[in-house]
Amino acid sequence: MLIMELFMNLFFNQALANTAIDQVESQSSNFMPPAATEIAQKFDTLYTFLLVISFISSVLVIGGMIYLAYKSRRKTEDQKTAYIAHNATLEFLWSFIPFVFFMIVFAWGWVIFYQMQNAPKDAFEVHVTGQKWYWDFTYKSGKTSSGEFVVPADTNIKLIMTSRDVLHSFFIPAFRIKQDVIPGRFTTLWFRAPKVGEYQVFCTEYCGDNHSAMLAKVKVLPKADFELWLQDNPYKGLSLAQVGQKVYQGRCIACHLTTEKKNIGPGFGGLYGKTREFNEADSLVADEEYIRESILNPNAKIVKGYPKGVMPTFAGQLKENELSGIIEYIKTLKK
């Protein structure tokens, strides 16, 4: 009964703290990012509890060692160590009390983990695809975005995730959620962000040279603004070159610079109209057809100095206006 009472008190106090999420702005501390979801606040409460009991335990153990060492010190050279009598009650308590706290932490952690892993049935579903080195987001309406994950505020969001190439890991520190993204399989994750704002997404599974550049932004909008965004054409009013720049920033920026400088792949600066030398093909001038083939079938011609198979194909991933836009954008880039 004592264990159950302690456990219920802890959860009751946590529940009171979590009800304040709508009245309190997301807060940060010196060692944790802002807690932007209810799960994040629960996670932080458990983490703080672990820190407190660990500190208290350390003080008791180290303090007890110092006290006993001082009390039991020899005052004279011929002094004999006093006989320490067996104390069944004390031995039981120093085993039982840590066991009680262990079970509390285990049950508390299991409840939070269960809540994190089981999305509500009415959750708004978004498909997430990882690929070296960017994130794609696809909505049921057919809307897609790359590098920008837009969601409505105060709504249950379920992520259905997979990878096109290697193992990635989708991590939003402010939400305290992280899940491996595996090629050939689907993994799921969910969250509910009550506050409007922007939050950083990282890949936390090393996936190649530009792993650290595999970033995205979560943009939490009011529900009315999200509905407008969902229906809006992201390229409305943009020229083809501006469309290409937008696609470049979402998909190409991790591997290709806008200068001649080499990165994972060749730089785009001054690329158009330049003679290209290949490992296993005759040289040719980089025109529209060459750039198009390099995007859709990148292994057809490998530029000298670069290994084969590094760049993935974008066939079936880009719409015709996006493909034409990238070509026009590359044309505008000078040396």
Image (cartoon, rainbow, N blue to C red):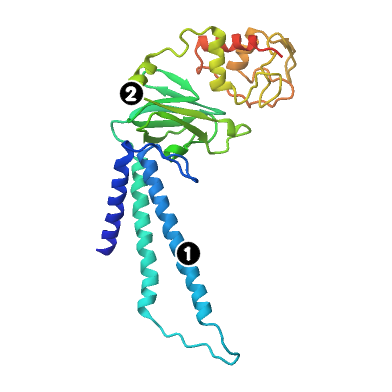
Quadrant of res 225: top left
- In the picture, measured across the screen, residue 227 lies left or right of residue 202, that is left
Q: Residue at x 30, y 57 (%)?
A: 7
Question: Which residue is found at the position 32% from the left and 37% from the top?
Answer: 23
Quarter of the image for the N terminus: give it.
Answer: bottom left
Q: Quadrant of residue 296?
A: top right
Residue sitting at x 50%, y 18%: 317
The relative height of residue 5 versus residue 141 in the rendered view (above or below) is below
Regarding residue 296, the answer to whether it shows in the image is yes
Residue 223 disc label: 2
* Element assignment for label 1: helix
**Residue 76 placed where, x, y %?**
58, 90
The one of 7 and 118 positioned closer to us in this rendering: 7
Label 1: few (<14), some (14–19) or many (≥20) C-alpha neighbours in 10 Å: few
Sequence-wise first label, 1 or 2: 1
Q: Position of residue 236 (x, y in %)?
A: 46, 9
Q: Residues within 10 Å of mark 2 (few under 14, many from 20)?
A: some
Residue 78 in the image: above or below residue 177: below
326 left or right of 15 in image = right
Amino acid found under the numbered disc labelled 2: Lys
Residue 328, picture quadrant: top right
- The residue that label 1 is drawn on is 58
